[in-house]
Amino acid sequence: MSVTIRRILEDLIGAMEQIDGTVDTLKPGNPEMVITGMVTAFCATQYVVERAVAMNANLLITHEGVFYSHHETSEWLEDDPIYLAKLSLIERSELAIFRYHDYWHRHQPDGIMVGLLRELEWSAYVVEQQSTATILSIPAMTVSEAAQYIKIKLGISYLRAAGDVSQICRHVGILVGYRGGGTMAIPLFNQHNLDLIIAGEGPEWETPEYVRDAVHQGRSKALIMLGHAESEAPGMKYLAEVLAQKYPMIPTYFIAEQPVYQLV
């Protein structure tokens, strides 16, 4: 049975209330095109686009933008050789790209969070699912032990931590993506008596400095920053599993990227 891009997009958005100004758009692509293969990824990097084409996939579902900005403005890149080469590849391959950001986060529960918790094998420890954070009660371990566990589970080589890494943590808050800023993360410490917050990323002068002051005052608070992609890629891997189960007739893959940063 043939499946069009339109059917997949209708399935992804479902009956959710329309989000004004959403970045979740099909660009480029013809919604009536029959799908030969689907790929999900955190970001439509040059490598991911090349792999999708090599796999004979004609629908790429990406969480973040293709051209280096959240709102996908590209006028400022019109003379940039990197932009032009990537755009040319996409146009030549006739690859359709759908940005699945706002609606996947709006899913109940947040699809990106579900994927991360599944990858960490912490789903059973969830105490409360909020719209932008999840509160857990995990087996007692030090912050350092938690960091080592996370690195193994997510297959990443390093994390950044603030606070006393030797302290015991049980009550944990997780925020994916760019939700590690002060206004989202800091109130959770007191509202839920948290020992540790695990976040994707956020301004370095907000939550990390709060944790620094807390430790200086003799309070047991800690922070682990995973990295934006590292916190959200598992959610796109989970999406590939969901789509493969719903549409077994369509070859469906998740493409992982290497961490963008290197330790030097």
Image (cartoon, rainbow, N blue to C red):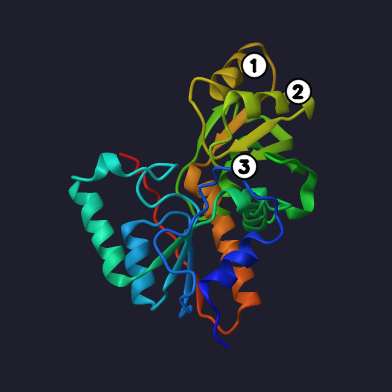
Label 2: which secondary element: helix
Residue 151 showing in the rendered view? no
Read off the residue under disc 1: 214
Quarter of image, res 137: top right
- Are the residues flagged by discs 2 and 1 in contact, CB closer than 8 Å? no
Counting residues from the start of the chain, the first of labels 3 and 2 encountered is 3
Q: From mark 1 to mark 3, how far is it between C-alphas?
A: 21 Å
At 29% from the left and 42% from the top, the residue drawn is 75
Q: Specify the amino acid type for callout 1.
A: Ala
Read off the residue under disc 3: 145
Q: From mark 3 to mark 2, how far is it between C-alphas?
A: 23 Å
Read off the residue under disc 2: 190
At 55% from the left and 80% from the top, the residue drawn is 3
Counting residues from the start of the chain, the first of labels 1 and 3 encountered is 3
Counting residues from the start of the chain, the first of labels 2 and 1 encountered is 2
The label nearer to you, 1 versus 3, is 1
Q: Is residue 194 above or below residue 108?
A: above
As drawn, the residue found furthest toward the bottom would be 1
Q: Residues within 10 Å of mark 3 (few under 14, many from 20)?
A: some
Q: Specify the amino acid type for callout 2.
A: Asn
Residue 233 showing in the rendered view? yes
At 70% from the left and 33% from the top, the residue drawn is 168
Q: Is residue 140 above or below residue 219?
A: below
Q: Specify the amino acid type for callout 3.
A: Glu
Task: Identify which residue, 8 or 109, lies in the foreground.
Answer: 8
Q: Residues within 10 Å of mark 1 (few under 14, many from 20)?
A: some
Label 3: which secondary element: helix
Label 1: which secondary element: helix
